[in-house]
Image (spheres, rainbow, N blue to C red):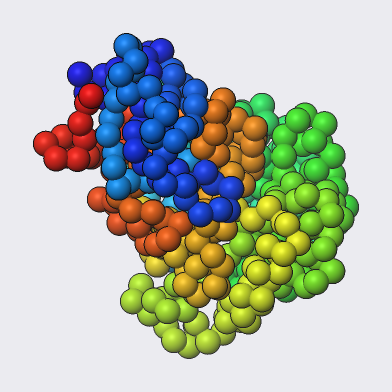
Amino acid sequence: MSLSSRPAGSRILLHDVSVQEGLGRPSIPSQSVLVNGDRIEAVMPAAQAPVYEPGVEVCVLTGRTVMPGMTLGHSHVAYVDVVTARDTMFKYSLPELTLYAAFNAARMLQLGYTGLVGAGSVAGIDMALKKAVDEGRLAGPRITPCSRDLMVSAPPDRRNPEVARRIPVELMPIVDSAAEMVSRTDQEIDEGAEVIKTFSSGDDTYPNARSHELLYTLDELQAVVRRAHDRGVRVRAHSRGLGGIRNAIAAGVDIVDHATYADEAALEAIAERGIFVVPSLYQPRQLLLNGTEHGKTQEYLDTLEFQAEIDNTLWLLPRAVELGIRLVAGDDFGFAWTPHGTYAEELAVYVEVAGIPAATVLTWATANGAALAGRGDDAGVVTAGRLADLVVTAGDPAEDIRVLCRPEAIEMVLMGGRTVRDAIRRDSALASM
């Protein structure tokens, strides 16, 4: 009987493995993980495992590591080879984007990402995709769907109603007043959004505002946060510039995206309030390194101040760790220079460029990612009672983070105890006892 055909409620023992718990510590060697139905029943020394107990299917995985399934905390699942802002909506037709999103979600799961938190959903695809995955019609991770981008035409003193007439509201609503923002928040929640996407600052790559410019006013952010929180929904804010970061904190958002110009005071306020931060190092670095290969001129890249954002991010990451800020991995995949399927490259950059220990970075994708997705007490850690969302790797990512960058090293993925990927060779590596 193959692992993927096991009946519901069966018990499987992942035997003689190292366990990477997802708690920022080195992996524990010579362990076994007992899965019962959709839950982890026990984690124990391999010598104490119920190898000969009737009803337990034993999979000997010597030399491998069991870790929690990962969560991508900032996902644009329907972005495909984006080069310009217009590409996010108009490069492909909506049917094509939907098919790409389904493909990306399935591939994400195969790479060990059992959770996805949306960060701006083109045409509400997040919500439809979640329903399809939950109903078993499509393969994919557990999805925490985000609203469409609730974008404004420009900073408060340059708002232009003509912009709204050029962009179909179904793809991305332009909401240039607090009343419109609140109304649209309600519509997105009614459609199934569990996170609302706002913009406290611009971005050097945006056509409507640079990173240091404000997009929403503080009052507008507060209006959205009040309505969303009243309805039990969280709010995330695109926040690169320091003014935007400060407004996002003051408004009470739940997630600060990027935070690239955060200073000490901002980090301390984020830590005090328990706000999640999804940092941005990989995407701007990739753009500067590889943008010319995808049609960006060097003159254009020179107009960006992304190197300053990168430099400040390299400062803030270790400081955020010291302060206990809940950092989560996920950095705008779907651009031409950050294609879907390369998610673990971001983790490697945090280790190799920012100097963060691999075991710490893994918590950003596991325990912290699960918490961001709303499953902090139910997933993200390999321990008894948690969901059996697990990944088996050939090698220990806490010792070599690049294990996760090699698709062939993601040998097994379980979601809710069900095997959704099994690439282990039966003739030599996996034995049933």
Q: Tell me: residue 271, above or below residue 420.
A: below
Residue at position x 42%, y 83% in the image:
297
Q: Which quadrant would the N terminus be assigned to in this image?
A: top left
Q: Nearer the viewer, residue 155 or 274?
A: 274
Q: Tell me: residue 236, above or below residue 257.
A: above
Q: Would residue 78 be visible to someone looking at this image?
A: no
Q: Nearer the viewer, residue 325 or 48?
A: 48
Tell me residue 241's x, y (percent): 72, 70
Tell me residue 82's x, y (percent): 42, 60
Residue at position x 42%, y 79% in the image:
289
Q: Which residue is the extreme one toward the front? A: 47
Q: Would residue 323 be visible to someone looking at this image?
A: yes
Tell me residue 183's x, y (percent): 76, 36
Residue at position x 43%, y 24% in the image:
35
Q: Tell me: residue 20, above or below residue 200.
A: above
- How many marks can you see? 0
- Is residue 60 toward the left or the right of residue 147 in the image? left
Residue at position x 41%, y 55% in the image:
397
Tell me residue 11's x, y (percent): 38, 18
Q: Which quadrant would the C terminus be assigned to in this image?
A: top left
Quadrant of the image occupied by residue 250: bottom right
- Is residue 360 toward the left or the right of residue 9 in the image? right
Q: Tell me: residue 300, above or below residue 175.
A: below
- Is residue 425 toward the left or the right of residue 353 in the image? left
Quadrant of the image occupied by residue 291: bottom left
Q: Nearer the viewer, residue 386 or 193?
A: 386
